[in-house]
Amino acid sequence: MIKRSITFMTLALALTTLCQAQSRKVITLPSWDFSRDGKAWQQVAVPHDWAISGPFDKKWDLQMVAIEQNGEKEKTEKSGRSGALPWIGEGMYKMNWTAPKGYKRAVLVFDGAMSQPVVSVNGKEAGKWAYGYNAFRIDITPFIQFGKSNLIEVHLNNVEESSRWYPGGGLYRPVSVELYGNENFSTWDTFVRTLKADKQEAEVEVNALLEGKTGKSGKTVIALLDEAGKKVAEQTVLGATPAIKTTLKVANPQLWSPESPYLYQVKLTRYEGKKVADVQTLKTGIRTIAVSKEYGFQLNGVTRKLKGVCLHHDLGPLGAAENKAALIRQIKMMKQMGCDAIRTAHNMPSTMQMEICDSLGMMVMAESFDMWIYPKCKNGYAKFFKEWSDKDITNLVKHHRNHPSIVMWSIGNEIPEQWSQEGVEISKHLQDICHQYDPSRPVTQGMDRAEDALKSGFAQTMDVPGFNYRVHKYYKNIEQLPQGFLLGSETASTVSSRGVYKFPVVVSDKATYPDGQCSSYDTEYCSWSNLPDDDWKMQDDYSWVIGEFVWTGYDYLGEPTPYDTYWPSRSSYFGICDLAGLPKDRYYMYRARWNEQQHTTHLLPHWNWKGREGQVTPVYCYTDGVEGELFVNGKSQGRVRKDKSSRLDRYRLRWNNVKYEPGEIRVVTYNQYGDKVGEDVKRTAGEPAQMKFSVETPDHEPIACMVEGCTDEHNVLLNADGNDLAFITVSLQDKDGNECPLADDELTFEVSGAGTFKAACNGDATSLEPFTQPQMKLFSGKLVVIVQSSKQKGDIILKVKDSKRNIEKSITLQAI
């Protein structure tokens, strides 16, 4: 009996396997051989950025150009405009891939390749794409042999003066291959959208398209599963018609929002008889979007103002190479600030980034182009626009439209054609393509020439008229907009260097200094832009301003405004966080306004000013409180209250006449009822005597241990997958535990065990130290070391040494 039971079970298992033998399979392709010249090859892990190791040098993309967006008329030398890294030139990738037996078709999927990728299979060109930021698919079935090894090659070519920022180089996003049997769902033709929803019931429409050799009969089962895997709705569609459409009704739905990012799973199963021909699963969220003159922007029927930031695609010291942990760190940091939306400026987002936004709860404006026909740089996307733009915008929408996080599409940024009838027609055309493939979301773009865009009708064409800067023009803009609302699609461009303060403290749109830094008093901005306070005034005083996207959430490589002609300077100063991901003072300014769940009280500047004794050293406080009292060495400097009539005092507390004396400054803040909100202290530090670590492991929730005070360092966990990252912030303290904000010591790093040193960054835009070498100087007293797990489990030991002061500290992480 036992033998017969085992035989029967084995036979049943074999039949089950046979019935599903040709259902789709997705295989990632992470290991490639890479060469810059086609002669010397090395094995690399994809995603890969060939340029991020440097060295930094002004020669790499030295441009003589007048930046029209900055109002420049004369050409000048721009040395760090695209990051001063060696991204220009050709790169080649190859791999031998064995195509499994039992499948009929294979499709290569590139989530992005920088740039102009040409793909060959077994020596024959299989396909190509022009835009380095877009995802694309290539059917390689005619070129491969199943059951045998196949040579896949990718040729890339980055041309000089083709980017206004650092684009990176290489296969910088994941590559995969999709395998199918005779019949399957066309991956990007499956579209799930919410028709209507409230707390009682939702209607979710599912569209799909069958491709391949479809049979004469068959059925498709479409199911909606909740987060626990429980089926909450199901429909069966009979027949072999390629186009499939049905509506699922869901009782008591969980609605997706930034505050509650609930995800369902849609599962489509195609049967031919009893055989499973294909299964496609995808995550989605149930939520509604609306925008109107009466109610502004609404999510799930509730009006809210977008609290957004713009993000470039690079990950600071990691370059353009995508990494899940680094993306999670970015989004979590922004959410803790109270941010609820990002704009993927100025290019198509990645799949991984959108999946993270779905799961963590971050709304997204998914952007497409930085230029159309008129070029902003000599060899930019304008060269490809006429031939490729329809295909690119189609891929953007079809690829990403199932992500609940995406709430609008953007078809352009500061397009020069704003003044022309041709520009109006292109706007209508691109917006219509978005509507064709996704009628559920509005379309916008960022306009920087308000008068031109309104005179031509360019602005009136858009579902959502987005304006970049010139906030003082909003009053005239709204009078000419039939939409009845407008969006700050790009705002602020306030500049600062973390931990750097300049005196006297003045408001300026053209301040520069011999050291190539900007003041962290947050009173400096660019000629075309403004302070955060100006945007908030418009949003608070006028319901027709539906929100903003701040330029930018993080510093990024390239565009070192206001130091475009200064060397060395190779990264931006716009970020709310610096290039290492460390918060600047401005982070707490936005947090005080945006984070409604937690109180904020943040004091600046630091209090180490040897040589300024007796001199006026203004003290600012960023808080959600309305009033505060400042003490210098215990002596009150008086209470100040926010003042709605004052530009700099409506959203800040300021003590402008404080005279520096070493010791302690302390602030206590209060709400409108006189209740204490919080306090903050800054102390004059002595000589560095010890080292402090703070650890972030973004892919673990909650973060297991912030190392200081942690009783078991083995609680700091990483995934032993070869990709997970830990971000360790290193700073120096005096003997009493006060951080030393002026320390600029050079530190060295050593990683042993089940991990490797990945990169380091100190956030200094003028530093030419390579990110990928295990030594770096502190900047404003801090830097970040990034450690990567290997594929083996075990301890990872990081040792950091300051030889100048003979200080050394180690930490043990655990890869599991």
Image (tube, grey):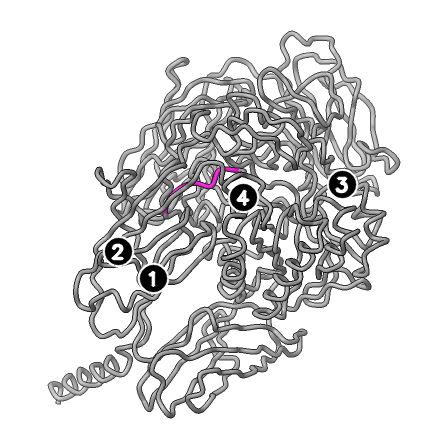
Taking depth in this image into account, of 341 and 596 the one nearest to the observer is 341
Q: Which residue is mark 3?
A: 470
Magenta residue span: 165-170
- Among the two numbered marks 4 and 1 on one chain, the one whose residue lies closer to the N terminus: 1
Residue 314: percent from the left, percent from the top? 48, 42
Q: CA distance from mark 3 to mark 4?
A: 22 Å
Q: Which residue is mark 1?
A: 108
- The answer to whether residue 2 is left or right of residue 325 is left
Q: Which mark is residue 586?
A: none
Taking depth in this image into account, of 576 and 438 the one nearest to the observer is 438
Total number of numbered labels?
4
| Amino acid at the residue labelled 1 | Leu
Residue at image location 27% in from the left, 74% down from the top: 104
Q: Secondary structure at mark 3?
A: loop
| Amino acid at the residue labelled 2 | Ile
- The answer to whether residue 50 is left or right of residue 605 is left
Q: Quadrant of residue 760?
A: top left
Few, some or many residues within 10 Å of mark 4 (<14, 14–19, 20+): many
Q: Secondary structure at mark 1?
A: strand
Residue at image location 81% in from the left, 41% down from the top: 472
Q: Which residue is mark 4?
A: 312
- Among the two numbered marks 3 and 4 on one chain, the one whose residue lies closer to the N terminus: 4
Residue at image location 62% in from the left, 44% down from the top: 337
Q: Which residue is mark 2?
A: 152
Residue 293: percent from the left, percent from the top? 80, 62
- Among the two numbered marks 1 and 3 on one chain, the one whose residue lies closer to the N terminus: 1
The answer to if 211 sits in the magenta stretch is no
Residue 10: percent from the left, percent from the top? 17, 82
Residue 697: percent from the left, percent from the top? 44, 44
